[in-house]
Image (spheres, rainbow, N blue to C red):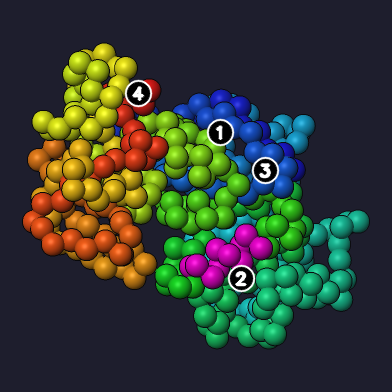
Amino acid sequence: MKVTLKSLTKKFPSRNKKGDEVIAVNNVTLDIEDGMLIGLLGPSGCGKSTVLNLLSGLLKATDGQIFFGDDDVTGLPPENRGVGLVFQNYALYPHLTVRQNITFPLENRRGKDKLTRAEMNEMALETAKLVQIDTLMDRKPSELSGGQQQRVAIARALVKKPKILLLDEPLSNLDARLRLQTREEIRRIQRSTGITTVFVTHDQEEAMSISDLIVVMREGVVQQVGKPQEVYDSPANLFVAKFLGTPPINVFNGEVRDGKLYIGDEAILDTSLDNCEVDVAIRPEGFELSDNGVLTCELSRVEVMGRDVSIVATHSSAHTPTLRAIIDSDNVISTDRVRFDIKPSKLFVFDKSGNKLTL
Protein backbone atom coordinates (compact mmCIF):
# COMPACT_ATOMS: atom_id res chain seq x y z
CA MET A 1 0.00 0.00 0.00
CA LYS A 2 1.43 3.36 -1.05
CA VAL A 3 1.24 6.09 1.59
CA THR A 4 1.22 9.79 0.68
CA LEU A 5 1.45 12.73 3.04
CA LYS A 6 0.51 16.12 1.59
CA SER A 7 1.43 19.27 3.52
CA LEU A 8 0.71 17.45 6.78
CA THR A 9 0.74 19.72 9.83
CA LYS A 10 -0.05 19.12 13.47
CA LYS A 11 -0.29 21.96 15.99
CA PHE A 12 -0.84 21.65 19.71
CA PRO A 13 -2.24 24.49 21.82
CA SER A 14 0.17 26.23 24.15
CA ARG A 15 -0.06 25.38 27.85
CA ASN A 16 0.33 29.10 28.44
CA LYS A 17 -2.72 31.03 27.22
CA LYS A 18 -0.49 33.81 25.93
CA GLY A 19 2.01 31.46 24.33
CA ASP A 20 2.28 30.39 20.70
CA GLU A 21 0.98 27.10 19.39
CA VAL A 22 3.45 24.21 19.31
CA ILE A 23 4.00 22.99 15.73
CA ALA A 24 4.97 19.35 16.16
CA VAL A 25 4.75 18.49 12.44
CA ASN A 26 5.30 21.29 9.97
CA ASN A 27 4.08 20.96 6.37
CA VAL A 28 5.43 17.44 5.76
CA THR A 29 5.05 16.11 2.21
CA LEU A 30 6.23 12.54 1.66
CA ASP A 31 5.66 9.56 -0.65
CA ILE A 32 6.15 6.05 0.74
CA GLU A 33 6.04 3.48 -2.02
CA ASP A 34 4.22 0.17 -1.65
CA GLY A 35 6.22 -2.47 0.23
CA MET A 36 8.96 -0.17 1.47
CA LEU A 37 10.37 0.13 4.98
CA ILE A 38 10.83 3.80 5.86
CA GLY A 39 12.85 4.97 8.86
CA LEU A 40 11.61 8.19 10.51
CA LEU A 41 14.73 9.45 12.22
CA GLY A 42 15.53 12.39 14.43
CA PRO A 43 16.23 13.53 17.99
CA SER A 44 13.58 13.49 20.72
CA GLY A 45 10.89 16.08 20.04
CA CYS A 46 11.47 16.25 16.28
CA GLY A 47 7.90 15.12 15.45
CA LYS A 48 8.53 11.58 14.23
CA SER A 49 6.15 9.88 16.69
CA THR A 50 3.54 12.54 15.96
CA VAL A 51 3.72 11.61 12.27
CA LEU A 52 3.19 7.98 13.26
CA ASN A 53 0.16 8.88 15.39
CA LEU A 54 -1.28 10.92 12.52
CA LEU A 55 -0.85 7.93 10.19
CA SER A 56 -2.59 5.64 12.69
CA GLY A 57 -5.42 8.08 13.33
CA LEU A 58 -4.65 8.45 17.04
CA LEU A 59 -4.11 12.16 16.35
CA LYS A 60 -6.12 14.38 14.04
CA ALA A 61 -4.19 16.51 11.56
CA THR A 62 -4.45 20.28 11.84
CA ASP A 63 -3.84 20.71 8.11
CA GLY A 64 -2.91 18.53 5.15
CA GLN A 65 -3.97 15.11 3.91
CA ILE A 66 -3.04 11.45 4.31
CA PHE A 67 -3.65 8.98 1.48
CA PHE A 68 -3.49 5.19 1.65
CA GLY A 69 -3.29 4.32 -2.02
CA ASP A 70 -5.92 6.55 -3.68
CA ASP A 71 -8.06 6.78 -0.54
CA ASP A 72 -8.02 9.94 1.56
CA VAL A 73 -7.94 8.62 5.15
CA THR A 74 -7.28 11.97 6.85
CA GLY A 75 -10.62 11.95 8.68
CA LEU A 76 -10.97 8.18 9.03
CA PRO A 77 -11.03 6.78 12.61
CA PRO A 78 -8.14 4.47 13.63
CA GLU A 79 -10.19 1.27 13.58
CA ASN A 80 -11.08 1.79 9.92
CA ARG A 81 -7.59 2.55 8.61
CA GLY A 82 -6.27 -1.00 8.53
CA VAL A 83 -3.01 -0.21 10.33
CA GLY A 84 -0.98 -2.33 12.72
CA LEU A 85 0.76 -0.39 15.48
CA VAL A 86 3.59 -1.67 17.67
CA PHE A 87 4.31 0.48 20.72
CA GLN A 88 7.60 1.15 22.47
CA ASN A 89 6.43 -0.55 25.69
CA TYR A 90 4.84 -3.59 23.92
CA ALA A 91 1.43 -2.99 25.62
CA LEU A 92 0.68 -6.69 26.05
CA TYR A 93 -2.18 -7.88 28.24
CA PRO A 94 -0.43 -9.51 31.23
CA HIS A 95 -3.32 -11.81 32.14
CA LEU A 96 -3.60 -13.27 28.63
CA THR A 97 -1.43 -15.94 27.02
CA VAL A 98 0.63 -15.30 23.90
CA ARG A 99 -2.11 -16.92 21.81
CA GLN A 100 -4.80 -14.76 23.41
CA ASN A 101 -2.76 -11.60 22.98
CA ILE A 102 -2.29 -12.33 19.28
CA THR A 103 -5.94 -13.21 18.64
CA PHE A 104 -7.30 -10.23 20.59
CA PRO A 105 -7.58 -7.89 17.55
CA LEU A 106 -9.53 -10.59 15.70
CA GLU A 107 -12.17 -11.01 18.39
CA ASN A 108 -13.75 -7.63 17.70
CA ARG A 109 -14.70 -8.46 14.12
CA ARG A 110 -18.41 -8.41 13.40
CA GLY A 111 -20.78 -9.36 10.59
CA LYS A 112 -19.24 -10.97 7.53
CA ASP A 113 -15.73 -10.48 8.95
CA LYS A 114 -16.47 -12.40 12.17
CA LEU A 115 -14.17 -15.40 12.66
CA THR A 116 -14.63 -18.69 14.46
CA ARG A 117 -12.32 -19.55 17.35
CA ALA A 118 -10.62 -22.19 15.18
CA GLU A 119 -9.98 -19.63 12.44
CA MET A 120 -8.53 -17.15 14.92
CA ASN A 121 -6.24 -19.78 16.42
CA GLU A 122 -5.07 -20.83 12.97
CA MET A 123 -4.24 -17.22 12.02
CA ALA A 124 -2.49 -16.69 15.34
CA LEU A 125 -0.33 -19.79 14.87
CA GLU A 126 0.53 -18.81 11.31
CA THR A 127 1.63 -15.35 12.45
CA ALA A 128 3.50 -16.73 15.46
CA LYS A 129 5.51 -18.97 13.14
CA LEU A 130 6.41 -15.94 11.06
CA VAL A 131 7.94 -14.20 14.09
CA GLN A 132 9.28 -17.50 15.50
CA ILE A 133 7.33 -17.69 18.76
CA ASP A 134 4.99 -20.58 17.87
CA THR A 135 6.43 -22.70 20.72
CA LEU A 136 5.48 -20.05 23.31
CA MET A 137 1.75 -19.80 22.64
CA ASP A 138 0.58 -20.85 26.13
CA ARG A 139 2.95 -18.60 28.10
CA LYS A 140 2.04 -15.32 29.78
CA PRO A 141 4.03 -12.13 28.99
CA SER A 142 5.77 -12.31 32.40
CA GLU A 143 7.31 -15.62 31.33
CA LEU A 144 8.90 -14.12 28.22
CA SER A 145 12.12 -12.22 27.59
CA GLY A 146 12.00 -8.65 26.28
CA GLY A 147 12.74 -9.80 22.75
CA GLN A 148 10.01 -12.44 22.89
CA GLN A 149 7.50 -9.89 24.18
CA GLN A 150 8.39 -7.62 21.28
CA ARG A 151 7.72 -10.46 18.84
CA VAL A 152 4.31 -11.02 20.42
CA ALA A 153 3.53 -7.33 19.93
CA ILE A 154 4.59 -7.54 16.28
CA ALA A 155 2.54 -10.71 15.77
CA ARG A 156 -0.53 -9.03 17.27
CA ALA A 157 -0.11 -6.16 14.81
CA LEU A 158 0.42 -8.49 11.85
CA VAL A 159 -2.34 -11.02 12.52
CA LYS A 160 -5.08 -8.72 11.21
CA LYS A 161 -3.14 -8.35 7.95
CA PRO A 162 -2.79 -4.57 8.08
CA LYS A 163 -2.27 -2.35 5.05
CA ILE A 164 0.41 -0.42 6.92
CA LEU A 165 2.67 -1.48 9.81
CA LEU A 166 3.76 1.29 12.21
CA LEU A 167 6.61 0.69 14.65
CA ASP A 168 7.17 3.31 17.37
CA GLU A 169 10.73 2.88 18.71
CA PRO A 170 10.16 -0.88 19.14
CA LEU A 171 13.73 -1.70 20.18
CA SER A 172 14.45 0.96 22.78
CA ASN A 173 13.69 -1.33 25.76
CA LEU A 174 16.08 -4.09 24.64
CA ASP A 175 19.74 -4.58 25.44
CA ALA A 176 22.35 -3.95 22.73
CA ARG A 177 22.75 -7.52 21.45
CA LEU A 178 19.01 -8.17 21.46
CA ARG A 179 18.40 -4.89 19.62
CA LEU A 180 20.68 -6.11 16.83
CA GLN A 181 18.94 -9.47 16.59
CA THR A 182 15.44 -8.00 16.73
CA ARG A 183 16.04 -5.33 14.08
CA GLU A 184 17.27 -8.07 11.74
CA GLU A 185 14.08 -9.99 12.50
CA ILE A 186 11.94 -6.93 11.78
CA ARG A 187 13.60 -6.57 8.38
CA ARG A 188 13.11 -10.27 7.63
CA ILE A 189 9.44 -10.14 8.62
CA GLN A 190 8.84 -6.98 6.59
CA ARG A 191 10.40 -8.49 3.48
CA SER A 192 8.47 -11.75 3.83
CA THR A 193 5.12 -9.97 4.27
CA GLY A 194 5.71 -7.07 1.87
CA ILE A 195 3.76 -4.73 4.16
CA THR A 196 4.57 -1.05 3.85
CA THR A 197 6.26 -0.22 7.16
CA VAL A 198 7.12 3.01 8.96
CA PHE A 199 9.78 2.59 11.65
CA VAL A 200 10.31 5.42 14.13
CA THR A 201 13.63 5.67 15.97
CA HIS A 202 16.14 8.18 17.31
CA ASP A 203 18.94 5.63 16.75
CA GLN A 204 20.53 6.39 13.38
CA GLU A 205 22.34 3.04 13.27
CA GLU A 206 19.01 1.19 13.55
CA ALA A 207 17.40 3.31 10.85
CA MET A 208 20.31 3.01 8.44
CA SER A 209 20.68 -0.75 8.87
CA ILE A 210 17.15 -1.84 7.96
CA SER A 211 15.45 1.00 6.07
CA ASP A 212 14.94 1.33 2.33
CA LEU A 213 14.69 5.09 2.83
CA ILE A 214 15.31 7.30 5.82
CA VAL A 215 13.51 10.54 6.60
CA VAL A 216 15.56 12.83 8.85
CA MET A 217 13.43 15.28 10.84
CA ARG A 218 14.16 18.29 13.02
CA GLU A 219 11.61 20.39 14.91
CA GLY A 220 8.75 19.01 12.83
CA VAL A 221 10.42 19.71 9.48
CA VAL A 222 11.81 17.08 7.08
CA GLN A 223 15.49 17.81 6.55
CA GLN A 224 16.34 15.10 4.01
CA VAL A 225 14.86 11.97 2.43
CA GLY A 226 16.99 9.34 0.72
CA LYS A 227 18.62 5.94 0.81
CA PRO A 228 20.63 5.56 4.03
CA GLN A 229 24.07 5.45 2.39
CA GLU A 230 23.24 8.34 0.06
CA VAL A 231 22.16 10.53 2.97
CA TYR A 232 25.31 9.59 4.88
CA ASP A 233 27.55 10.30 1.89
CA SER A 234 25.82 13.53 0.89
CA PRO A 235 24.08 15.23 3.84
CA ALA A 236 21.81 18.13 2.86
CA ASN A 237 22.89 20.34 5.77
CA LEU A 238 25.06 20.42 8.87
CA PHE A 239 22.31 19.04 11.10
CA VAL A 240 21.99 15.87 9.00
CA ALA A 241 25.79 15.52 8.78
CA LYS A 242 26.10 15.71 12.57
CA PHE A 243 23.13 13.45 13.28
CA LEU A 244 24.26 10.52 11.12
CA GLY A 245 27.41 8.59 11.89
CA THR A 246 29.07 6.77 14.80
CA PRO A 247 31.46 8.17 15.95
CA PRO A 248 29.89 11.50 14.96
CA ILE A 249 31.35 13.72 12.29
CA ASN A 250 34.11 16.16 13.32
CA VAL A 251 33.27 19.84 12.76
CA PHE A 252 35.81 22.68 12.54
CA ASN A 253 35.64 26.42 12.14
CA GLY A 254 37.08 27.07 8.70
CA GLU A 255 37.72 29.86 6.25
CA VAL A 256 37.94 30.20 2.49
CA ARG A 257 40.75 32.52 1.40
CA ASP A 258 42.11 33.03 -2.10
CA GLY A 259 40.86 29.75 -3.51
CA LYS A 260 41.87 27.56 -0.57
CA LEU A 261 39.99 26.06 2.35
CA TYR A 262 41.69 26.65 5.70
CA ILE A 263 41.34 25.05 9.10
CA GLY A 264 43.31 27.28 11.40
CA ASP A 265 46.47 28.31 9.55
CA GLU A 266 46.61 25.19 7.37
CA ALA A 267 45.24 25.02 3.83
CA ILE A 268 43.67 21.61 3.45
CA LEU A 269 41.96 21.84 0.05
CA ASP A 270 41.59 23.92 -3.10
CA THR A 271 38.15 25.40 -3.69
CA SER A 272 36.23 27.64 -6.07
CA LEU A 273 34.23 29.24 -3.23
CA ASP A 274 34.41 32.97 -2.59
CA ASN A 275 36.15 34.16 0.54
CA CYS A 276 33.98 33.46 3.59
CA GLU A 277 33.84 31.81 6.99
CA VAL A 278 32.53 28.24 6.94
CA ASP A 279 32.09 25.09 8.99
CA VAL A 280 34.17 22.14 7.79
CA ALA A 281 32.85 18.65 8.64
CA ILE A 282 35.05 15.55 8.25
CA ARG A 283 33.90 11.98 8.84
CA PRO A 284 36.13 9.98 11.25
CA GLU A 285 37.06 7.62 8.41
CA GLY A 286 38.06 10.61 6.26
CA PHE A 287 41.46 11.04 7.93
CA GLU A 288 44.66 9.41 6.63
CA LEU A 289 47.85 9.47 8.66
CA SER A 290 50.72 11.12 6.78
CA ASP A 291 54.07 12.57 7.82
CA ASN A 292 53.37 15.54 5.56
CA GLY A 293 49.62 15.74 6.09
CA VAL A 294 47.68 18.96 5.57
CA LEU A 295 46.06 19.02 9.03
CA THR A 296 47.99 18.89 12.31
CA CYS A 297 46.33 17.81 15.56
CA GLU A 298 47.47 17.22 19.12
CA LEU A 299 47.23 13.55 20.12
CA SER A 300 45.23 12.80 23.28
CA ARG A 301 45.09 9.02 23.20
CA VAL A 302 44.77 5.99 20.97
CA GLU A 303 41.90 3.50 21.38
CA VAL A 304 42.43 0.07 19.83
CA MET A 305 39.14 -1.45 18.62
CA GLY A 306 40.36 -4.68 17.05
CA ARG A 307 40.20 -4.13 13.31
CA ASP A 308 40.50 -0.34 13.60
CA VAL A 309 42.21 2.26 15.74
CA SER A 310 40.46 5.38 16.99
CA ILE A 311 42.73 8.39 17.35
CA VAL A 312 41.39 10.87 19.89
CA ALA A 313 42.96 14.27 19.28
CA THR A 314 42.40 17.99 19.76
CA HIS A 315 42.46 21.01 17.49
CA SER A 316 41.92 24.64 18.39
CA SER A 317 39.38 25.08 15.57
CA ALA A 318 37.26 22.03 16.43
CA HIS A 319 33.72 22.59 17.70
CA THR A 320 34.17 19.88 20.35
CA PRO A 321 36.91 19.33 22.96
CA THR A 322 38.15 16.25 21.10
CA LEU A 323 37.91 14.83 17.59
CA ARG A 324 38.09 11.25 16.40
CA ALA A 325 39.84 9.71 13.42
CA ILE A 326 39.36 6.04 12.50
CA ILE A 327 42.43 4.47 10.89
CA ASP A 328 43.66 0.95 10.13
CA SER A 329 45.14 -0.90 13.12
CA ASP A 330 48.38 -1.55 11.21
CA ASN A 331 49.40 2.09 11.72
CA VAL A 332 51.89 2.84 14.50
CA ILE A 333 51.70 6.20 16.30
CA SER A 334 54.63 7.33 18.40
CA THR A 335 54.39 11.14 18.49
CA ASP A 336 52.40 13.71 20.45
CA ARG A 337 51.31 15.35 17.21
CA VAL A 338 49.55 13.64 14.33
CA ARG A 339 49.22 14.90 10.78
CA PHE A 340 46.45 13.89 8.44
CA ASP A 341 45.58 14.08 4.80
CA ILE A 342 41.84 14.38 4.19
CA LYS A 343 39.73 12.26 1.83
CA PRO A 344 37.72 14.79 -0.24
CA SER A 345 34.69 12.48 -0.39
CA LYS A 346 34.47 12.50 3.41
CA LEU A 347 34.69 16.28 3.78
CA PHE A 348 31.72 18.65 3.64
CA VAL A 349 31.56 22.43 3.84
CA PHE A 350 28.63 24.43 5.21
CA ASP A 351 27.94 28.12 5.60
CA LYS A 352 27.43 29.48 9.09
CA SER A 353 23.67 28.86 8.78
CA GLY A 354 24.30 25.15 8.21
CA ASN A 355 23.56 25.10 4.47
CA LYS A 356 25.73 22.86 2.34
CA LEU A 357 28.21 24.50 -0.04
CA THR A 358 29.69 23.01 -3.19
CA LEU A 359 33.47 23.10 -3.27
What residue is drawn where x is 35% and y is 54%? 246
Task: Name which residue lies at 22% across and 63% down.
Answer: 332
Q: Is residue 43 magenta?
A: no
Say whether residue 200 is left or right of residue 188: left
Secondary structure beneath dot 4 equals: loop
Q: Residue furthest front?
A: 292
Q: Give the Cα separation between the discs numbered 1 and 3.
A: 12 Å
Q: Are marks 2 and 3 in contact (CB under 8 Å)?
A: no
- In this rendering, the answer to whether 163 lies above or below 178 is above
Count neighbours of disc 4 (C-alpha within 10 A) and say few if under 14, some if 14 to 19, many if 20 or more. some
Q: Are marks 1 and 3 in contact (CB under 8 Å)?
A: no
Residue pointed to by mark 3: 77
Whichever of callouts 1 and 3 sits on the residue coming sooner in the sequence is 1
**Residue occupied by mark 4:** 359
Give the residue number, with chain letter if any, for mark 2.
151
Q: Give the residue type that dot 3 points to.
A: Pro
Q: What is the three-letter code of the residue carrying label 4?
A: Leu
Q: Quadrant of residue 260?
A: top left
Q: Earlier in the sequence, mark 1 or mark 4?
A: 1
In space, the residues marked 1 and 4 are separated at their CA atoms by 41 Å
- The answer to which of 258 and 25 lies nearer the viewer is 258
**Magenta residue span:** 179-188
Q: Residues within 10 Å of mark 2 (few under 14, many from 20)?
A: many
Alpha carbons under labels 2 and 3: distance apart? 26 Å
Q: Secondary structure at mark 1?
A: loop
Residue at the farthest right position: 112
